[in-house]
């Protein structure tokens, strides 16, 4: 197999043009492209036999493939990669798409999570694909804490942050808790909670407990210690992955086997098994990255493509990522600028609002 970096240089103008038109026709229709179809698109007179010979040469070097012996050609993963890297003509964001994204981002969202939910849904809608947004980890200061008893072995902790963000988490309290001990624990925490982050609160409570150990009911003290241990245990991996438009990707799969693979992909995403991997895909520098099929382990099973771009805070630190997942025949020329524009807009809004 000839190295991909050398293939384009070895092509003459006719071969390069045939290859480009095959890929563009496939990305537009999703169907194999035949030689007779291409004869109607060339300004110069080329016979179907001539185009067929060129397509056979492209198949020989691994850029095109035939799903069936009598069918037309489709680009291989290598062919798509070479097209994206060398021949892709990236457009601009249309005024309609730009207005829709900006309007969504300008809505009065109560917190960062809600804002990114809205943006993710809009991104899925205008691209007709699934969207993924990596939300940043929150380090916001806390305004109020409340414990709610759900059952003898389950309790809910509600964290209200000063920026309006609210977190609800279920945990297992120490045995023997009562509504009274829950209220006592919440009152104790709220007496000096406001203005502190979780890390600062944990340190302050540790010091406070050591000073007031004899004053705190044993059960309430155990609840405080258990609850904080639960919050703190996930602080290094508390990014939130927002997935929207799952049905768009499933609808694009024609075969039941493809649907099963795509469902498995989303199951993985929703279990957050590969959140770190998703962000790593975008952290290798600024700008949009395109991953096709098996080029990354996150999408190797589903055969999907990912167009992803990081977004940054005011200090130019990467804090999250925005992406679109779709079949390998994505309209890359349209989606790349949309993802880039959305990522830059999200980073700017979060910086201006001083939330991160």
Image (cartoon, grey):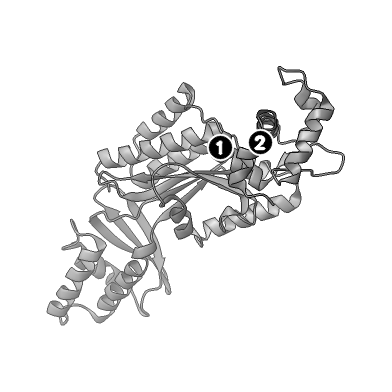
Residue, disc 1: 86
Give the percent coordinates (x, y) of residue 48: 82, 26
Q: Is residue 21 above or below residue 272?
A: above
- On the image, numbered disc 2 is attached to which residue? 11
The relative height of residue 85 versus residue 270 in the rendered view (above or below) is: above
Label ID, residue 299: none
- Toward the viewer: 151 or 349? 349
Secondary structure found at label 2: loop
190 over 257 or under it: above or below:
below
Q: Picture quarter containing residue 185?
A: bottom left
Q: Dot 2: few (<14), some (14–19), or many (≥20) neighbours within 10 Å?
A: few
> From mark 1 to mark 2, how far is it between C-alphas?
13 Å
Res. 239 in view: yes
Mark 1 Cα-neighbour bin, 10 Å: few <14, some 14–19, many ≥20: few
**Image-quadrant location for residue 15:** top right
Residue 41 in the image, given as x and y percentages of width and height = 72, 21
């Amino acid at each position: 197999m000839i190295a991909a970096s050398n293939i384009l240089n070895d092509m003459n103008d006719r071969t390069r043009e045939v290859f480009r038109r095959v890929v563009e026709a496939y990305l537009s229709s999703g169907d194999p492209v035949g030689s007779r179809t291409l004869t109607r698109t060339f300004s110069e007179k080329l016979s179907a036999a001539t185009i067929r010979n060129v397509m056979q040469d492209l198949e020989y070097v691994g850029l095109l493939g035939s799903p069936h012996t009598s069918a037309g050609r489709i680009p291989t993963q290598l062919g798509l990669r070479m097209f994206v890297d060398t021949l892709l003509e990236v457009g601009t964001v249309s005024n309609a798409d730009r207005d829709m994204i900006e309007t969504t981002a300008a809505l009065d969202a109560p917190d960062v999570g809600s804002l990114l939910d809205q943006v993710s849904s809009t991104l899925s809608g205008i691209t007709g694909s699934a969207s993924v947004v990596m939300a940043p980890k929150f380090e916001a200061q806390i305004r109020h804490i409340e414990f709610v008893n759900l059952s003898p072995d389950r309790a809910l902790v509600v964290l209200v942050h000063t920026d309006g963000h609210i977190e609800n988490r279920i945990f297992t309290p120490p045995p023997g808790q009562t509504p009274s001990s829950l209220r006592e624990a919440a009152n104790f925490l709220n007496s000096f909670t406001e203005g502190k982050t979780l890390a600062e609160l944990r340190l302050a409570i540790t010091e406070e407990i050591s000073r007031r150990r004899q004053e705190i009911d044993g059960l309430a003290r155990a609840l405080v210690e258990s609850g904080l241990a639960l919050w703190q245990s996930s602080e290094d991996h508390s990014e939130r992955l927002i997935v929207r438009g799952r049905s768009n990707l499933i609808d694009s799969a024609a075969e039941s086997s493809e649907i099963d693979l795509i469902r498995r992909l989303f199951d993985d995403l929703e279990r957050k098994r590969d959140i770190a991997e998703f962000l790593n895909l975008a952290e290798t520098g600024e700008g949009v990255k395109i991953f096709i099929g098996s080029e990354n382990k996150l999408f190797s099973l589903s055969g999907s493509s990912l167009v992803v771009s990081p977004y940054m805070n005011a200090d130019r630190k990467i804090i999250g990522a925005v992406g679109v997942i779709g079949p390998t025949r994505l309209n890359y020329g349209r989606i790349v600028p949309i993802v880039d524009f959305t990522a830059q807009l999200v980073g700017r809004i979060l910086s201006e609002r001083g939330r991160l």
